Amino acid sequence: MRAVFSVVAFAAFLFPAAVYSQDLGSANKLFGGPKKESAAKAPKKPTPSKSSPKRPVSANKTRIPNQRSASSGVSRSKFAAPPSEAAVKPTAAVLQRFEAFLAEGNAARDARSYTVAQTAYEKASLLLPQDARAAIGLGNIYSDRQLWDQAEQQYRTALRLSPVDPWVLIALSYVLSQPIVVDDLAGRYAEAERLARRATELAPKNALAFDRLGVAMELRGLIGSETEDAYLRAVELDPGFAPAYAHLGRLMRRRGMSAQAQSFYRTAISKATHTSTMILVAEVLQSEQRFRESEGLLRQAVERDPYNHSALLLLSKALLTLERYSEAETLLRKSLERGANGFRTYMLLASINLRQGNVPLAENALLQALRDVPSNEKAILAQKFEAVGDAYDRSGKTAEAERCFRQSLTLDRQRTTAAAKIGQLRKVN
């Protein structure tokens, strides 16, 4: 079995304050691409079953593979669950319903109807829990929405069911590369590297695998020749793979080679001709504070894929940085229409309102974010509540300020600055 993922789908972004973003860029969802986009020169994708969508996914969209690889003729059962899990052969009716749910999930994901897609994949998983494709579908949906804990769980399930599938290895490597707040981030990056390296061994002609290996090594602070070789190998395998050029640009910049970096960035921008690669390259540019350069790519991406969650968030981030607040807010409101990640969207909305001095609206946005805050991002939300409390305090609204400081402290008991500010307010009053 091979999980059919095309080159995009990295969701690396958005962290504290106004905008969060993975500082070593990967970009949005891992595994998707516009109509005819795929990881160039990667192993052939299986022929879709009649119930599967007919085109590869776009940046955020990952196709769920069919039961048999057209290129290899290898049945999915070769990489399926252990015999104890696959002992009972499903009936034809169950298989038909399973394929129908996968097709429904794929179609809904293409339409950015994340809730509908998630429900369909969950139904598929209940029917055939030993089939990795349902877990892959759920992992894709969670990754699209930047719900990293859930994405990791599903991709690990898929890897258990299909341990030699390079695309699943790439997917999990991508999720582990996210700069989330955990005790052992270095350990996650090290595992991301191991998974990507294993993917290159299983699929030595997969450009995306080598690109992800370079990213994982770079995240670990390895900016020497081995990391450069990984990116160069990706370019050799697919000369049109724009993200690898962007990563080379960033690597050269980190080495102090500005002229070479600029050349690679120009190449990346010129070769980013699909929605997916536009997003990936724009994310890398933003990790280098090149927001104005990212804007053009992201506008094209949003024009082609109006509800692409990652494109909308990245473009909003660029507009926020460029102080075009009204347009940024409009885009963020749009992203909420299809069940995207409310936490990240509301955090950005709070930043926009805070920048404009609309403190009550900023607080309200944070209260909306509070409903969906992941456990590992409570400290980030606490930081933002404290910032809103500071804004209230500066305007003399001490009761409102204390309310926000208390909420900050509730989210993060270690936030001593919020506790000190509460004490100071009490002394004054």
Image: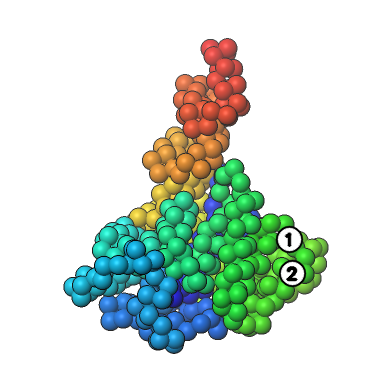
Residue at horizontal 24%, vertical 70%? Answer: 90
Calculate the distance from the C-alpha at mark 2 to the C-alpha at mark 1. 8 Å
Dot 1 surroundings within 10 Å: few (below 14), some, or many (20 or more)? Answer: some
Above/below status of 217 relative to 346: below
Element assignment for label 1: loop
Q: Measured from the top left, where is residue 375 in percent x and y?
A: 47, 41
Residue type pointed to by label 2? Glu
Q: Measured from the top left, where is residue 106 in percent x and y?
A: 33, 70
Residue behind mark 1: 222
Above/below status of 425 relative to 7: above
Q: Measured from the top left, where is residue 417 in percent x and y?
A: 61, 27
The reply to whether discs 2 and 1 touch (Cβ–Cβ < 8 Å) is yes
Image side of residue 404 versus residue 337, left or right: right
Q: Measured from the top left, where is residue 113 in percent x and y?
A: 32, 62
Residue behind mark 2: 226
The numbered mark at residue 373 is none
Element assignment for label 2: helix
Dot 2 surroundings within 10 Å: few (below 14), some, or many (20 or more)? Answer: some
Residue type pointed to by label 1? Leu
